[in-house]
Image: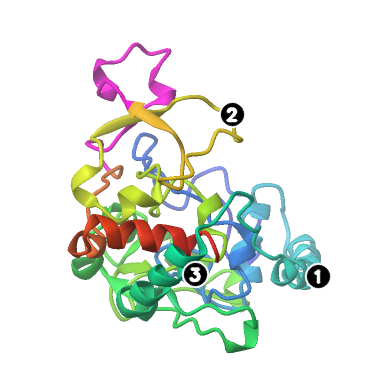
Amino acid sequence: HRDPVTLAWRDEPLFELSTDLVIPADPPPWWRAAKKASNFANGMSRGDHRGTMVLASSLCTDSVEEAALVVDYFDDIQAYLASIAAPRYPFAIDEALAADGAAIFDCSCAGCHGTYADDGAAETFPNLLIPLDVIGTDPSFATLAAAGGYYHQLREWFNGSFYGMFSEVVTDDPTPGYTAPPLDGVWATAPYFHNGSVPSIALVLDSTARPDSWRRLDLDSTHFDEAALGWPWEPATAWNDAPASERKYIYDSTSFGYGNGGHTFGDRLDEGERRAVLEYLKTL
């Protein structure tokens, strides 16, 4: 409804958006901001991230003058975000098993997710955008935002707007895909994948064991599965078959945008190797 240049409200929308085409997105933890070149799963936020971070202010800002003040606040906010450290794993770690997992991780995972060290200056992070046909995770978010996708209008509006002076939204350069995130504090970030479709890292590493429909055992954030690294869960009824009162608790991976396939790289590891990688991830 807003003019992209002046941000003034228009009673008639500039383009129509669906009221029922809604897909899930799992917000990443703030402590990743210092390493990531883009704050969005599909790598669309390029350049100065203030533009895309303050986009929500357009809901309550009617002028460029007001928006400019908000953008200025984000100089300090970005500096704060860059200072946030990932939480340390609070439970016991099998150091010998973690050391074995480190070697497997460096060989099988570091190419996308980076390397880690006690000295942050010795770490590396490649900031890769992985093509959809390589990562294989649910493509809906990336394809809907790409050129020709249903939400490409937002990209065009943003890049031609006041906010586009600071950031650029790029949804298919060089290709639609998803960014491989840094894994600092990954143990604390369930559920996993860009759409929150996988409740534990153990299931990230074994695509064959992922449930079609699942729900958390409870909503107690201190109830943590130390072996699987993630939420304790149980199989659930398909969303359409569940009572309306229960649907908000169920994740049904057969729904559009909710798929939990892809990222099959851990399938090539045996069970012992996966356990070792899980133990290593506790140390990050």
Q: Is residue 12 left or right of residue 147?
A: right
- At horizontal 31% and vertical 65% (from top left) the residue drawn is 146
User: Rounded to the nearest whole Å, what is the CA distance between mark 2 and mark 3?
Assistant: 26 Å
**Distance (Cα) linking label 3 and label 1:** 23 Å
Residue 18 falls left or right of residue 163:
left
Instruction: Tell whether 145 sits left or right of 82.
Output: left
Q: Is residue 253 magenta?
A: yes
**Reading the chain from its start, which is encountered first: label 2 or label 1?**
1
Residue mark closest to the camera, 2 vs 1? 2
Q: Is residue 7 left or right of residue 186?
A: right
Quick check: marks 2 and 3 in contact, CB under 8 Å?
no
> Which is nearer the eye, 143 or 29?
29
Residue density around tag 2, few if under 14, some if 14–19, many if 20 or more, within 10 Å: few
Q: Residue at x 63, y 74 (%)?
A: 34
Residue type at mark 1?
Answer: Asp
Q: Specify the label residue 130 is tagged with.
A: none
Residue that carries the numbered disc 2 in the rendered image: 220
Q: Which residues are magenta?
A: 235-256
Disc with the residue nearer the chain's start (2 vs 3): 3
Read off the residue under disc 3.
Answer: 182
Q: Which residue is mark 1?
A: 76
Q: Which SS class for mark 2?
A: loop
Percent x, y of residue 110? 39, 77
From the top left corner, tell me how far across and down residue 140 is, in percent.
Answer: 28, 52
Q: Nearer the viewer, mark 2 or mark 3?
A: 2
> Can you see residue 143?
no
* Vertical side of 193 occupied by 245: above or below: above
